[in-house]
């Protein structure tokens, strides 16, 4: 079975704020020279490295969206 890298590969503190989009073949080490990384190990990724990848728009990582608020809002009434 081939290696894959996904959100569960990331360290727990990174998983809380970031997620891998889909699954990447191989890894957890990758060379991303266009993003300034050679031998980047996603199992040891830091918050700073994840933030840098997001800022540089690497398409396979994104910031997790915050959970929906627990306060409910009244549904919009349909226009008549």
Image (tube, rainbow, N blue to C red):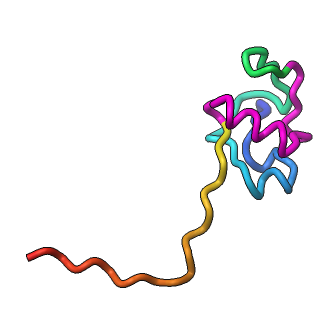
The answer to whether residue 69 is above or below residue 33 is below
Whole-percent x, y for residue 5 in the image? 76, 37
Which residue is at the far top?
Answer: 33
Whole-percent x, y for residue 74 in the image? 36, 84
Say whether residue 68 is left or right of residue 55: left
Q: Give the residue displayed 65% in from the left and 54% down from the top.
A: 64
Which residue is at the far left?
Answer: 80
The answer to whether residue 28 is above or below residue 46 is above
User: Which residue occupies the foreground of this view, 11 or 69?
Assistant: 69
Q: Give the residue displayed 81% in from the left and 45% down from the top.
A: 9
State which quarter of the image contains the N terminus.
Answer: top right
Say whether residue 68 is left or right of residue 43: left
Q: Quadrant of residue 24?
A: top right
Say whether residue 70 is left or right of residue 2: left
Q: Quadrant of residue 28?
A: top right
Is 46 magenta? The answer is: yes
- Count of number-bearing discs: 0
Q: Give the residue displayed 85% in from the left and 55% down from the top.
A: 13
Q: Give the residue displayed 73% in from the left and 42% down from the top.
A: 6
The answer to whether residue 41 is above or below residue 77 is above
Whole-percent x, y for residue 43 in the image? 88, 41
The answer to whether residue 43 is above or below residue 14 is above
The magenta region covers 38-60
Is 47 magenta? The answer is: yes
State which quarter of the image contains the C terminus.
Answer: bottom left
Whole-percent x, y for residue 50 in the image? 78, 40
User: Which residue occupies the foreground of this view, 1 or 5?
Assistant: 5
């Amino acid at each position: 079975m081939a290696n894959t890298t996904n959100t569960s590969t990331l360290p727990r503190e990174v998983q809380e704020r970031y997620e891998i989009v889909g699954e990447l073949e191989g890894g957890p080490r990758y060379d991303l020279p266009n993003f300034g990384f050679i031998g980047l190990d996603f199992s040891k990724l830091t918050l700073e490295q994840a933030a840098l990848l997001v800022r540089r728009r690497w398409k396979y990582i994104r910031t997790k969206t915050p959970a929906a608020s627990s306060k409910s809002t009244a549904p919009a009434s349909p226009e008549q």
